[in-house]
Amino acid sequence: MGKVTMCKVLQGGGNCSVNQRVIGLDLIRFSLAVLIFMFHSHIHVLKCDYGFFNGFIRMGAIAMTGFFLLSGYAINLSSGSKDMSDNKEIKRFYTKRLISILPLYYVWALIVIVTNIVAKGISAIWEEIILFPVETLGIQSVFSTLFPYSHNGGSWFISCILICYFVFPLIHLFTKHIDDNRRLMLIICLSAILLYSPFVQSYFNLQGIYSNPFFRVLEFSIGVLVCQMNMKEDNKFKIILFLRKPAICILTIITLLVGVSIAFYIGIPADFMLYNWIALPCFISLLVSLGYLEFKRLQNSKTIQYLSALSFSIFLSLIIAVWYIIKYAMEYIGCESNIVKILSSAIICFTIANFFHYCVEIPSTKYLKLKFLK
């Protein structure tokens, strides 16, 4: 996703006087990747047990709401002072975004497609041929019932984030010069749509909206707006000043963990988007606080920066069916230890993620940047 830096400038433009890494956003990104890992290890064949947190982990897919909010926040942070009405700037923006995602996505997709053909036989080849243009362009998420085919159950989020990046210049142009009161009204309106829509879907038993790009673009847009409100070092907007407090950050984390767990255990329907009523405000609050607070001891931590950079590869590594490999291996040796299942799956996923990161993501990004971003 690239290096995340903070430019402390007055709203409305100007040159960055300070350009430093926002380590709080790195912490959010890696935490979301860990939550998604725990979610997958719990719901798939391993059925890893996390004790009291099982309820929260079972609803761990709410992390994707945090991910799209964070993506909007981070993209605006790195592009906040740029002129998105300039053709050269827009071309450079799209080139950087595509370079950061497509090479790793294409390599991962090729591995999954080949595996799918080997497993299903010749019938899968025709499926892949028909789906090739859709998956190459990254528009599979607009087909609401494509989830079970090929790798689309795993790559929907890549499709959604590509669509978010595509519309970002328009979002940026529309929101850059409005005041914070209007930004807050927009956040409230977009949030209302996100909170209300899952109830409509649930009541009428409609197709799920979890992978719907429209709703993910709304989350992404909220992230952009929150960043614009939080960028000013001398911000006097009361709600922003309130959410920046470290105590509020800690309280938000506790509220998210306990609130989701209690809601799940008392029987609120286990629909990930339905849980936005607690996830959305909590993730917004965390973005405001962790996107502003300074962590002096962690500011130059290479470990945190490395784990954050690894997050995209971790997301992709989770889709490869390591859960079945571990399950069969443990059955073969006669081991059913919960801690062994958790540790072994974590090690394997971490190893795969590092392979993708160092053998594909880093070299392809370096090469393509030198070629197209001179």
Image: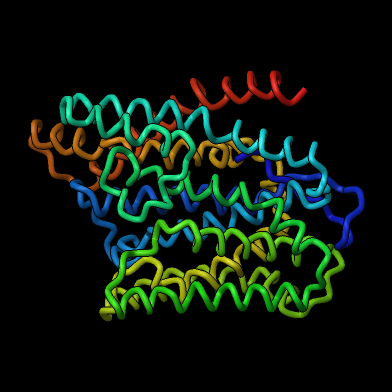
Instruction: State left or right for residue 102 relative to residue 187.
Output: left
Query: Would residue 255 be seen by someone viewing this image from the given angle?
Result: no
The quadrant in which the N terminus is found is top right
Instruction: State left or right for residue 261 relative to residue 285.
Output: left
Give above or below for 300 relative to 118: below
Taking the spot 49% from the left edge, 20% from the top edge, the residue there is: 359
The quadrant in which the C terminus is found is top right
Give above or below for 103 relative to 307: above
Whole-percent x, y for residue 260 in the image? 39, 72
Whole-percent x, y for residue 301 in the image? 65, 40
Residue 221 image-quadrant placement: bottom right
Instruction: State left or right for residue 264 relative to residue 103.
Output: left
Taking the spot 50% from the left edge, 61% from the top edge, the residue there is: 214
Taking the spot 33% from the left edge, 69% from the top edge, the residue there is: 271
Whole-percent x, y for residue 151 in the image? 32, 39
> Which is more toward the observer, 240 or 64?
64
